[in-house]
Amino acid sequence: MMEQYPCPYRKLLNCSISDCKYENELIEILNKCIEVLNKIAEGDTSQVIDIKTQKACLQSLIDTINKARNEIEEFINLNHELAIGICEHFDVLRRLQAGDFSAKASEDSSLEIVKMLGQLINRQKNRFVDYINKIKEQHEEMVKLYEQERVILSSIGVSILISEEDMTVEFVNEEFERLTGYTKTEVEGKMKWTEFIPEDILPMMVEFHKLRRISPSLAPSQYEFKFKDKNGNIRDALLTVAMIPYTKKSIASIIDITERKKIQEQRIHSQKMESLGMLSGRVAHEFNNILSGILGFATLLNSKIEDSILKNLIQKIIEAGERARDLAKNLLVFSRKEELGEIQKISLNEYLIKFSEFIKPIIGRDIELKLKLPENEIFYRINPAHLEVILMNLVTNARDAMPEGGELAIGLKEISLDLEYHYTHPLIKPGRYILLCITDTGIGMDEQTKQRIFEPFFTTKPKDKGTGLGLSTVFGLIKKYNGHIHVYSELGKGTTFKIYLPQEEKKSSASINKETLKGHETLLIVDDDAQTRQYLSAFLKDYGYEVYEAQDGKKAVEIFEKNKDKIALCLIDLVMPGISGIEVMRQIKNINARAKTIIMSGHPIEFKNIISIEKSISADEILLKIRNMLDQKE
Amino acid sequence: MAIRVLDYSGLKCPYPILKLSAQYPQFKEGEIIDIIGDCPTFEKDIKAWCNKLGKTILNIEKQGNKIKVTIRI
């Protein structure tokens, strides 16, 4: 066959020339065309047929192949650009989805659709980033608001408690810690609010809790209740509760009204006394008129009758009438309708010296009378008859309280009561007062008796010994001078009556420079009465002192043991449950023999080798005493 | 750690880079990958892909009619 067709393409081209001179050229061109077409078929458009031939047919083939190659190359390039654009945008979307907002799609593709897709992605991303930034800003704002609310809730001067639906306490503030004695860590998430409530009112409060969650209007939003603090003390409080929107939690604010209630009770008591005074005054006045008739006619009858038996009976009527008249007179004095003389300026020192001589035979030999007068003479404008009624009543009561003898002390001094004292004794206005103290070491009184002693006709004495008008008369007379009377008593220890008579405002010549009262030392206050302890602690801190507080002797000794090198002085209450103040002082001295201590008491007391103060003396005087002790002036 | 190998032999461009993009989310940052292909524009496509996505080409090796490109993700 090869001999017949020496040229491999002769048959293909139907060529009849046996000795064709273009045979080789043809072969070369066709080979090249096949090679390039194969490459194009594989996707490789890198080669171009650059052969030029005279044969129009071949040249046309070459040109057609080259044209096809160009078209295919352009198509491949387009395809590649489209693919690479998709890959790139796909990657940008993937990064955005993963939270990488630095990813940015390129917008430089020559393909409009790829370019627009890039622009669209970037615009969407920017909108999304703006949206996220706004959410972030709002979130930061909410976090700030949340922090602010927490600070407000924490530092507000009202106790706050947030309760979960199951009554678990979620949050309490600092004031709650102060009020109850529990710490946040003890309460939050661990305790239920029901643990603070006395059993008798618990079912009612639980019911309110449940009803409030059905509808807030079903339970009262504000009511008075009682709660137990950490020491088990029951306190009166005002509760205001509200549901927190969108939750099943409630927020409760608690205001301790224990003191307010006490003051209210004192006011009511005081008003009751006033009204009783007025009423008894009117009754006594009418009664006196009737008695004048009875006594007058009985006396007349007595002078006209000779029969000794009848005379004796009339005498009994007269005696009974006279007793009734005395009672009416007492009632009139109590109601301040009976004036027994005039107000005059008298020397109290002089008066008390004379008075003490006068009462010596009345109180008897078993009672030792002590008169404590200041060096300076104190004058006061008072009706001496009133003063006598006041003192006589208190002295005879003191005498009756000491059937087996004891000590009766009458003290006099000028004092200045400041605002701090007013906060703890709201009925007494700040200012200068004359303080008269009548102290006995008698049987004392229980709390119930103490509450009622100023009520008219209340008496603990046997029927024929007391009218029950003595102390109510004293109360009425002291009120007349805008004064106050306080009683401090302990069973088996004795009683102190303190009479505060207001002085006209005058500039104190012996005013103390506040700066000299300041200090930086650490003090330990030991007192079972939380109010006194906190009051002392607060003003000592104001004056720069560091203060530890202990509610009983055991705790005091523990604190002192731990801080013996730091505590410069201990203020110890004399009478406390458990270990007494003197014993606490002794144990502290055992730890450090040089420890400085001051014993505090409601009574004016004096111990040998023990420095003591009265709790009711002014803040300045307490500070001065402390300063003097620390500076070793005492 | 064994190098991940992606064999795209027989696939015409631009399928290899489309497949590479689809598989890419499973790779770890810094991972080294061998990509094998036999399309005439394979090398060019991988280079363009790396350039656009900011990846590094570590090596290009011809293996007969195939090309192996090593890149770091």
Image: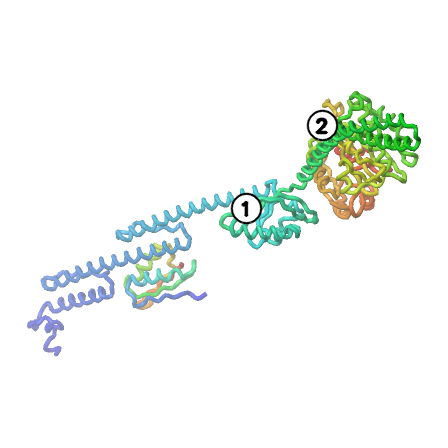
Q: Secondary structure at mark 1?
A: strand
Residue A256 x %, y %: 64, 42
Q: Of the numbered discs in the image, which one, if any, rests on residue A579?
A: none
Tell us which disc is closer to us: 2 or 1.
1
Evaluate whether residue A149 shows in this view: yes
Q: Residue A91 at x, y = what percent?
A: 36, 56
Q: Residues within 10 Å of mark 1 (few under 14, many from 20)?
A: some
Please indicate whether residue A547 sits to the left or right of residue A349 in the image.
left
Structural crowding at the residue carrying mark 2, measured as other residues with C-alpha within 10 Å and reported as few (<14), some (14–19) or many (≥20):
some
Write the residue at 81% across / 35% down.
Answer: A467
Q: B67 or A179, which lies in front?
A: A179
| Chain of residue at mark 1 | A
Which percent across, then down, holds residue A169?
A: 59, 51
Q: Is residue A257 above or below residue A347?
A: below
Q: Please name the residue that numbered disc 1 is placed on.
A: A242
Nearer to us in this view, A28 or A160? A160
What is the residue that sits farthest to the left in this orientation?
A16
Name the residue: 81% across, 25% down.
Answer: A385
Q: Which residue is mark 2?
A: A431
Mark 2 residue type: Gly
Report whether A342 appears left or right of A96: right
Indicate the chain on which mark 2 is placed.
A
Quadrant housing residue B71: bottom left
Q: Specify whether A86 is left or right of A51.
A: right
In the depicted view, which residue is nearer to us: A290 or A261?
A290
Q: Quadrant of residue A570?
A: top right
Q: Position of residue A15 (x, y in %)?
A: 8, 71
